[in-house]
Amino acid sequence: MVACLVGVVSSQGTAPLPDIRPDTRAKPDTPWQVHVAYGSPASTSLTVTWQVQRETRDAVVEYGSTPKLGSRVDPLRIVYASATGVTYAAKLDGLKPASTIHYRVGRPGAWSQIFATRTAPSVPTPFMFTAFGDQGVLAAGRQSLADITADAPDFHVLLGDVSYANGFQPIWDAWFDMMEPFAARIPVMPAIGNHEYEKEIGPMSYLGRFTLPEDELQYTFDWGDVRFVVANTVLGMTDAQLEWLDRSLAQARKDRVRWLIVCQHFPLFGTTAGRGFNMPLITRESAVIDKYDVDLVLCGHDHVYERSYPVIGRKPVTDERTHYRKGMGPIHVIAGGGGAGLYKFAPRPSTFNAIRELTHARLRVTVPVDGALRVEAVRPDGSTLDRFEIAP
Ligand SMILES: [Fe+2]
Ligand SMILES: [Fe+2]
């Protein structure tokens, strides 16, 4: 199906070309690009999405708490104009919190392998998640995938700019094919990036290919007593988006979540050359983030690693490098080094910068039941470039 893409120039830079493998499925209707995400709520609901070449009447997910499976659910066929194949998506509801779910997708005679994934817990539970943005399908994006695979997180947050298909749909196929060994087992929760708004079709492929909570462009999910608020910043925070963010953060505080983490593509306080601070977004969003005492704001878009001190009222409140207390102010992290070509920094860091480094990197965020939340940024060679803690 996507056997040959020689001659395609990636917008992630000039050569090398995307490493797109031939479609090696034994049969054309064997599922591929299988991936899972949390449904609503994440503790009892999962979604599974996959693609086949031909429509079949008997597409199904078989699942259960053991590899013997035993339960079945019919998927929806997801129809969208930019599709390269037939997409099916199924919601597995009524699952047990913090439980392993074994499943396979397809139809009799053309099954995927049996994968195992897990629901989120409903009570405080220690966990670790990984995050980065701006991945693509080139060698560095594949390395990032290998790195998070080795990290074995409970789930992965993708901070936007996913495949860089930019209107050339087989690149999406290549990204999901590349991700399947990870994403069929570990829920991947993306925030939409500007590269997911493709020319002429907007976010159609993104919406068609991912199956996410709420309206998919912005949503929240809980992992134990930690809330993730995944915002859509690509349209510059419209009134409706800002109202949604305000309402979601207010609800999180009402629900007394222990940690409150905003995930979005566009950063506020970047120091990339030619970009710098995003003043329109700062004007729209920073007061809302401050108002609800968000603990972490995780962003992509700038293909660099940089991280602020705690910031309140558009000012850093300390120059302490590594140890913080909850309530000092939101800490903004730009983890746009998921694999796409790196940018350049403006010559001088800003007074907001606790650290900045031009490198590919992923975040590992470790959340214990008691004690400090710990964030590490790790280079592809395994060395740690940033590490900080927020004590409760
Ligand atoms: Fe971007
Ligand atoms: Fe990007």
Image: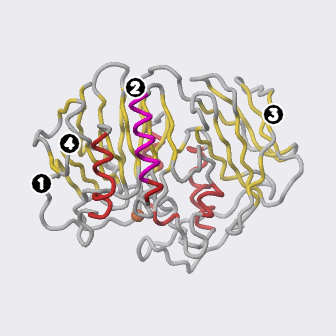
Q: Quadrant of residue 2?
A: bottom right
Percent of width and height locating residue 272: 25, 65
Percent of width and height locating residue 303: 33, 61
- Which residue corresponds to the image point at 18% horizontal and 67% vertical from the top-left? 346
Name which of mark 1 and mark 2 comes first in the sequence: 2
Tag 1 residue: 351
User: Is residue 167 rendered to the left or right of residue 295?
Assistant: right
Note whether ligand 2 is within 8 Å of mark 3.
Answer: no
Dot in front, 3 or 4:
4
Question: Is 41 contained in the magenta span?
Answer: no
- Cβ–Cβ under 8 Å for marks 2 and 4: no
- Which residue corresponds to the image point at 47% horizontal and 64% vertical from the top-left? 138
Question: Is 249 contained in the magenta span?
Answer: yes
Name which of mark 3 and mark 4 comes first in the sequence: 3
In 3D space, how far apart are the residues under numbered discs 2 and 4 (Cα atoms)? Answer: 21 Å
Tag 4 residue: 310
- Cβ–Cβ under 8 Å for marks 1 and 4: no
Q: Quadrant of residue 351?
A: bottom left
- Cβ–Cβ under 8 Å for marks 1 and 2: no
Crowding at mark 2 (Cα within 10 Å: few <14, some 14-19, many 20+): few
Name which of mark 1 and mark 4 comes first in the sequence: 4
Number of numbered callouts drawn: 4
Nearest the viewer among 45 and 155 is 45
